[in-house]
Amino acid sequence: MYVKLALSNAKKSIKDYLIYFITITICVSLFYAITSLSSSSYEFITEKSYNFEALKLILKYSTYIITAALALLIAYVNKYMIKRRQKEFATYILLGAEQRSVALMFFIEMLFIGILAIITGILIGTLFSQVITALVLMSINQEITFSFKLYEDTVLITFVFFILMFCIIGIYNIAILRKTKLIDMINAHKQVEFQFKRSKKVYSAVFLSSIILYIICGYCTIKLINTKIDYSINQIIYIGISLFSFILATYALFYSLAYIIIYIKNKSINFKYEKTNLFLLGSILSKIKTSPILMSTISITFLGAMISFIITLVMAQWSLGYLDMRVPYDIDIENKYSENFVKDSSINDIKDIPKLDYSEVIDYLNADGYDVSNYCQVEEYFINKEDFYNRNPKDVPVVAIKLSDFNKLRSMLGYEKIKFKDDEFAVQYHMVVNDKDIKKNIEKISSLNTDGKTLKISETPYYKESIGEGIYNLWSDHIIILPDKICDNLTLAKTNLLANINKKMTYEEANDFQNNYVYNWFEQNNKELVEKYSKEYNISHDLIESRIKSSETNNILTATLAMRILGIYLGIVLLMISLTILSLSQLADSIEHKDRFNVLRKLGVEEKEVNSIVLKQISLYFIMPISIAIIGVIIFIYNYYLIYKDVISTYIGDRAFLFSIATGIILMIGIYICYFIGTYYTFKRNIKN
């Protein structure tokens, strides 16, 4: 009997559950779409040079964590429905139903709605999974193929995950309903979220505190902008204080906002009594006074959603730009004399620095059919011999290379060769260094003393074209280009190999070459060095590092796709949670206080004016928490750009940066408008029925 009653109630209340149902359905569909990529029956049709197994695992387990946040929404909706229907539950109990049976009936009702949402979400998820597949294939320039399938293992995982979530929250609600007293059920509509102290001093002090906290947030932000980002303890403290003060300020603002509005209302007599403004202000104030914590939490959640949307899109574009700079060659093998400039993973004697000959590696590549088209063995030198002993990460020694090697690298990448006189030198800078800093640095090194000779800066003092990341000393952003004869008398620092091949390595071949062949080759050709230092640590892994373009491309594409997919998913989940709670909070008012609107109609207020009041009320209620979040996002993006403007200009480009921001904003506005319209029309329906 109770099961039939629960199902009957669910069918009758489907309109009340509509926004919740749509939210859960969309989240289930996205969960299914992302999780289906890791299905045993799912296959990416890609080239052998790509391997997205890591992407599948990242998406699978990250999706579980993100989707778990939906438990907050489900718990809130259950709490909302319980509070709204406690009078109904009390009636059942007064008619003779056991309290335990009423609680079980509500659990079945919510579970029924949840199962419908899961089934609908899975069907829609088959479409979303093709969108994600298309995104992956577009990223690697593959032909897009569509295949609409239901994957049994993913369907099972989706059902188990969400039903488990519904059951855990449902069992908790059963326990709550069983313990709730009958008199409390009858008087539930009189309870509010938070009881305020009726003191002007308290309101004023809290409002003043919110202003002070926002000022502290701004001060810390300005300090971060005006200092070079190195993630020191002080900077981490500033970041923490800035974030914490903003959150506290938001809660304090909404705590005192009702009093501020009342104060303004009392001062604006004409506005207060104009048309139906008194009624409108009363409705808004009653909600703000009873739910400041909810409003503040929604504002912070919305802020997190917007940042997730925008920053993950920006970071994904950043990664792709970084890829072009990091590995412009097919193969890049870097020999280092120190790993991270840590004493325990470095060569301690300058005489032990190996002079490598990569001809054996070239022969190996040709023998395996990779067909080396061009290569350059680059020798790098200490400008002063004493630089070898400098292991200070904050003052890394700058190394030098021969002009002939530099020109060889440029020709391999399609750049023109450079020239300067035998008594001159030039500087190659990392792409991310801005011209202003370069000019300051050039002024300091207008001349260079090395090996008893003085060189002057060439007519074209510096170059910024990308020649790879491994060419620079660790944590250094430039190298010195010297005439070949000068380098012949300098101390060798390291020897690198940069090569291009005609046959592309697959992901597995690249991993085998990096992790097996290169290390074995180094150990076999430097046995004495390995024996001397391997007693304390594995020297070969510290002093030789290789980057293969196919492997690096695969890894960065994996990171890029994961950021894009998970960032958008996280943003959608947080946004839909905040908007659903915001919407349900208003719809609860439409049911609990619809008598107010009936009174307005009896007083002669036209239906058009009633609809106008509803529109204004919902608009203000939606705008207030979101406006705080928007201000926070604007400040965040502005500061983010100022701090990383050189990197953004180099790896992303200002247009792409603005496009990423615009994409995130358009997605959010689209979802926001849908919820706003849905809330508005449901509110109108509730106050009419």
Image (cartoon, rainbow, N blue to C red):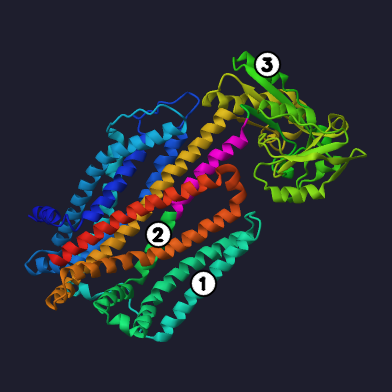
User: In whole angstroms, how far apart are the C-alphas of marks 3 and 1?
Assistant: 65 Å
Give the main secondary structure of the magenta stretch: helix
Name the amino acid type tagged 1: Leu
- Answer yes or no: do the residues labelled 3 and 1 have beta carbons within 8 Å? no
- Residue 560 lies, in percent from the top left, at 49, 40
**Residue 622: percent from left, percent from top:** 33, 64
Q: Earlier in the sequence, mark 3 or mark 1?
A: 1
The residue mark sitting in front, 2 or 3, is 2
Q: Is residue 316 magenta?
A: yes
Quick one: label 2 or label 3, which is nearer the N terminus? 2
First reached walking from the N terminus: tag 1 or tag 2: 1
Instruction: Tell me the distance, in whole angstroms, between the alpha carbons under discs 1 and 2.
Output: 19 Å
Q: Secondary structure at mark 1?
A: helix
Mark 3 vs mark 1: give the one in front: 1
Q: Position of residue 89 (x, y in %)?
A: 14, 66
- In the image, taking residue 558 as reference, residue 180 lies left or right, namely left
The magenta stretch is: 307-328
Q: Residues within 10 Å of mark 2 (few under 14, many from 20)?
A: many
Identify the residue position indicated by label 1 in the image: 213
- How far apart marks 2 and 3 lie (CA) works out to 58 Å
Q: Secondary structure under badge 3?
A: helix
Q: Quadrant of the N terminus?
A: bottom left
Q: Amino acid at mark 3?
A: Asp
Residue occupied by mark 2: 301
In the drawing, what numbered circle is on residue 452? Answer: none
Look at the picture and state if 408 lies above or below 108.
above
Residue that label 3 marks: 363
